Amino acid sequence: MPARMRVRLTTLLAALWLASSAAVANPARDSERNALRDFLDATINRASSFEDRFDAEVWLVDMSARLSPFVEDPDARLALLETVHFYARQSDLPPELVLAVIQVESHFDRFAISRVGAQGLMQVMPFWKDEIGRPDDNLTDMHTNLSYGCRILEFYLQQENGRLATALARYNGSAGSRVYTDKVENAWRRHWRTAPLNWQ
């Protein structure tokens, strides 16, 4: 690696370490539930991640600074951001959108449990573990929760032909309402926006 690139990467890594200072509802229709179960079962282990190390570190530095009001520990921020990016990219989702969903759903508390029993960062309903034959999965585990949550949102985006507003409402179990979508959009605009998203 050229010396200049090493210096840039070292600077970015240093900045990263110093940058510290609603639930997924049970689908109403059996056919939809069956389709989502099959989708989760088929895609839960797909793999992908950052394509370029330099781009990765630029993104991590930027997002770490944005995440610092929610997650105090720099190591925890880095681990969360790397994991969000990994599972978002697996599901063809903007990682910044996933961060906005997590902010609204759990406020970055991986042990959050809703009044209807949804669990973890993306508030996934536990029945999905049995539906896809993985009853021992731990939904408070960051990797497990993000894998499920991103796949479920990916499924609804496919069902809604890419319409983000209606896909988010279905993810939250509030189809026909913009309240949840508006909350996620507001979080995205205030904290996570890096590139345009179509919120229609």
Image (tube, rainbow, N blue to C red):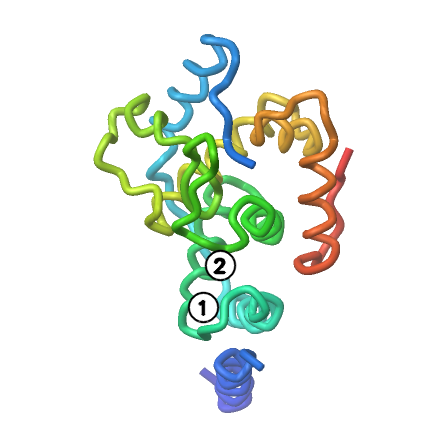
- The one of 199 and 181 positioned closer to us in this rendering: 181
* Quadrant of the drawing holding the N terminus: bottom left
Which kind of residue does numbered mark 1 sit on? Leu
Is 111 on the left or on the right of 152, as rendered? Answer: left
Which kind of residue does numbered mark 2 sit on? Glu
- The one of 111 and 184 positioned closer to us in this rendering: 111
Residue occupied by mark 1: 78
Say if residue 146 shows up in the picture: no
What element does badge 2 sit on?
loop
Q: CA distance from mark 1 to mark 2?
A: 17 Å
Is 168 on the left or on the right of 120, as rendered? Answer: right
Q: Position of residue 146 (x, y in %)?
A: 43, 45
* Quadrant of the drawing holding the C terminus: top right
Number of other residues with Cα within 10 Å of mark 2, as a class: few under 14, some 14 to 19, many 20 or more: few
Residue occupied by mark 2: 51
Q: Position of residue 148 (x, y in %)?
A: 41, 37
Number of other residues with Cα within 10 Å of mark 1, as a class: few under 14, some 14 to 19, many 20 or more: some
* x 28%, y 42%: residue: 138
Q: Position of residue 75 (x, y in %)?
A: 41, 73
Res 66 quadrant in image: bottom right
Look at the numbered discs 1 and 2 and tell me whether their residues touch, using CB distance below 8 Å.
no
Q: Nearer the viewer, mark 1 or mark 2?
A: 1
